[in-house]
Amino acid sequence: MRSRIGEFARLGVIQWGVMLAVLTTALLTIGCGADQSDSGRPAAGNSPEGNPDGLDITLRTDPDPVRTGENALEVVVTDRGKPVTDARVSTEFFMAAMPSMNMPEMRDKTELAHQGEGVYRGKGQIVMGGSWDVTVRVTRGGQEIGTKKMTISAR
């Protein structure tokens, strides 16, 4: 009887291991996919041939990678290779709530100032290390003309 129970226990462990491997592979496949804008198209600046609309949005940080505390943010916006100089650019860093750790969701929104030649700069606050979802929004005349979404890891 004892050897049969041990045999069933080993089979259970193997089955759980296989299920865990399949689930991990599926999550990695989903998580490593291309960034998507809200419309389902690749986010601006993420396609090798560029955005079909011509808008390219690039985010740089100092330090890189971002760290807890104040970080310098720089976004460069071009339209078909030409600097966009008449837009409003903002960033939003978001971390989902972690109820098991009794932590609420966290957000940091920053309006960036145009410095010239399509370069926009500002300072953002990262309150803790971990994975942050970042959205860069570009608007002109109250209309959103571009969005770029990405996930970054803060130290």
Image (spheres, rainbow, N blue to C red):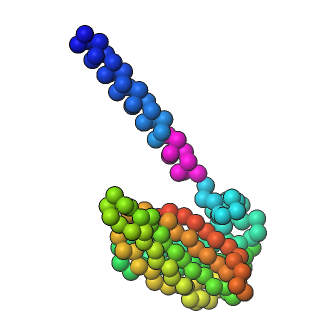
Residue 1: x and y, percent? 25, 10
Q: Residue at x 43, y 69 (%)?
A: 105
Residue 147: x and y, percent? 64, 71
Residue 27: x and y, percent? 50, 45
Residue 68, located in which quarter of the rendered image? bottom left
Residue 115, located in which quarter of the rendered image? bottom right
Residue 5: x and y, percent? 28, 16
Residues 2 and 31: in front is 2
Residue 155 visible in the current orientation: no
Residues 103 and 123: in front is 103
Q: Residue at x 50, y 63 (%)?
A: 151
Task: Give the extent of the magenta segment.
Answer: 25-33
Relative to 47, is 138 above or below?
A: below
Q: Is 78 within the magenta?
A: no
Q: Is 27 within the magenta?
A: yes
Name the magenta segment's main secondary structure. Answer: helix
Residue 144, located in which quarter of the rendered image? bottom right
Q: Residue at x 58, y 51 (%)?
A: 33
Residue 68 visible in the current orientation: yes
**Quadrant where the C terminus is found in the figure:** bottom left
Residues 93 and 56: in front is 93
Q: Which residue is drawn at 70% across and 59% down?
A: 41
